[in-house]
Image (cartoon, rainbow, N blue to C red):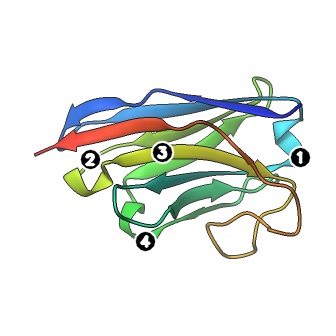
Amino acid sequence: QVQLVESGGGSVQAGGSLRLSCAASGYTSSTYCMGWFRQAPGKEREGVARIASGGITIYEESVKGRFTISKDNAKNTAYLQMNSLKPEDTAMYYCAAASRCVPGKVALSQMTKNYWGQGTQVTVSS
């Protein structure tokens, strides 16, 4: 059974940093596309960043240069390092995985089963 468990969320002031972790079990993360998504109240869920099985990363435009996605295959864990946080980054952040990414996009292929974590809240105050 595939499970994704996020951690690392919290409340910070603008300009601060947080590192989110996504611990995966039930599959080998090295063979999967993993991504971070977020949803703010009243808004649609949006892709933040994703990393393909080969390590290629893609970021949503507003987080480029501030966020870094990475993964540790030995630990079956993905990370999202978030620096220079802004109030508009406030949202529930979700980790997700699928056997394939969508080429060129912060998205997981809908042709394969997608797995989601329960989410972790990030709140940035001004």
Of labels 4 and 3, earlier in sequence is: 4
Between the C-alphas of marks 4 and 3, the distance is 17 Å
Q: Position of residue 78 (x, y in %)?
A: 65, 37
- Dot 2 alpha-carbon crowd within 10 angstroms: few under 14, some 14 to 19, many 20 or more: some
Q: Disc 3 vs disc 2: Cβ atoms closer than 8 Å?
A: no
State the SS at label 2. Answer: loop
- Dot 4 alpha-carbon crowd within 10 angstroms: few under 14, some 14 to 19, many 20 or more: few
State the SS at label 4. Answer: helix
Instruction: Report the mark closest to the observer, 3 or 2.
Output: 3
Q: Is residue 84 left or right of residue 35?
A: left
The residue positioned 82% from the left and 39% from the top of the image is: 29
Query: Which residue in the protein does label 3 denote?
Result: 93
The one of 5 and 64 positioned closer to us in this rendering: 5
Query: Which residue in the protein does label 1 denote?
Result: 31
The residue positioned 26% from the left and 47% from the top of the image is: 84
Q: Is residue 93 left or right of residue 30?
A: left
Where's the N terminus, which quadrant? Answer: top right
Q: Disc 2 vs disc 1: Cβ atoms closer than 8 Å?
A: no
Q: Residue furthest top?
A: 75
The one of 1 and 88 positioned closer to us in this rendering: 1
Instruction: Report the mark closest to the observer, 4 or 3.
Output: 3
The residue positioned 33% from the left and 29% from the top of the image is: 10
Of labels 3 and 2, earlier in sequence is: 2
Kindly identify the amino acid type of the residue bearing the numbered disc 2: Ser
User: Does residue 63 sit above or below 117 in this rendering?
Assistant: below
State the SS at label 3. Answer: strand
Q: Position of residue 55 (x, y in %)?
A: 74, 52
| Mark linked to residue 84 | 2
